[in-house]
Image (spheres, grey):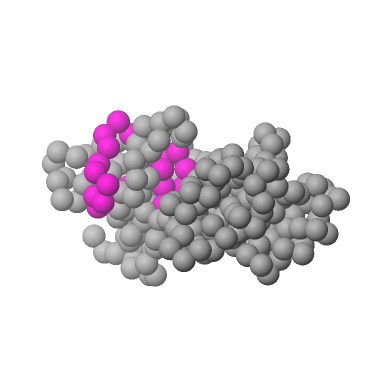
Amino acid sequence: MAEEKDQPMIFATRQILFTGLGHDDVHRLVSLLEAFEVDFHRVPWSEQLLSVVDRNGFDVVVAGYPAPDLPLNALVRALRAEGSASKHAGLVLFCPPGAVEGAEQMLGTGVNRVVSRSDADLHIQDSVLSLIDVPRRFQLRAPIHISDVANREDSVAYCHTENLSMSGMLVNCAHQPRIGALLEFSLLFPEEEVPIRGRARVARIADPRREKVMGVGASFESFAHCDRTRLRNALSRRWH
């Protein structure tokens, strides 16, 4: 297969942690960010939070402000400590309009952004996404044929995608290749007559409880001929 190497693509779903936020705030934030390559986590504002951010690498932490019990500077210290897995995470304070002035005094002390509940959705979305580089993810069910490059005869599967971005795809299939397996794929968009072909590497096994999918997440590694451009064009049509 001729391959379009272009630039290397890394499939790395960004991790966003919510803490100290009510149900309505979390629901709003998820609705603004779920179209992008991100996973969501929620941990109560408590002493447990400090050990969670120390042991687990998050890309963005969105924290309610004013902090209910635990002082905000305790979270900042835990995030920025040497050896913290979340040392470089962006920290966004989400607060009521009357608390914005106080929250903004924390900027430059480990806090990266301050947003108000009264801010427009686009401003809130941009405030979070500006801290991470994530491709937009499109919900799309399209037939896809995958086979394990190392074991083609026993691994051919006919599946369908659940979502796609320029970095990778979530594939719904009963056959689940191992993490790290290199797959050849042939993907047919509804409006296309010729499949998009390439290779992708399995990055993770889907979480059936959270994603309602049995299958795998895979990162694109290379494309046949000009098929990466065809994929970009197909996704761009859905954006506009």
Q: Is residue 180 left or right of residue 55?
A: left
Which residues lie in the magenta part? 161-187
Q: Position of residue 233 (x, y in %)?
A: 51, 57
Q: From the image, which quarter does the N terminus lie in?
A: bottom left
In the rendered image, the residue lying farthest to the right is 98
Q: Position of residue 144 (x, y in %)?
A: 35, 41
Which residue occupies 43% across, 52% down? 55
**Viewer-closest of 132 and 76:** 76
Number of labelled discs? 0
Which residue occupies 46% across, 66% down? 82
Which residue occupies 41% across, 43% down? 170
Q: Position of residue 19 (x, y in %)?
A: 61, 44
Q: Position of residue 177 (x, y in %)?
A: 25, 41
Which residue occupies 31% across, 49% down? 202
Is 66 colored magenta in this rendering?
no
Q: Is residue 123 visible?
A: no
Q: Is residue 17 visible?
A: yes
**Depicted 187 relative to depicted 224: above or below:** above
Q: Is residue 132 left or right of residue 217?
A: right
**Viewer-closest of 154 and 230:** 154
**Viewer-closest of 56 and 15:** 56
Quarter holding residue 43: top right
**Depicted 81 relative to depicted 143: above or below:** below
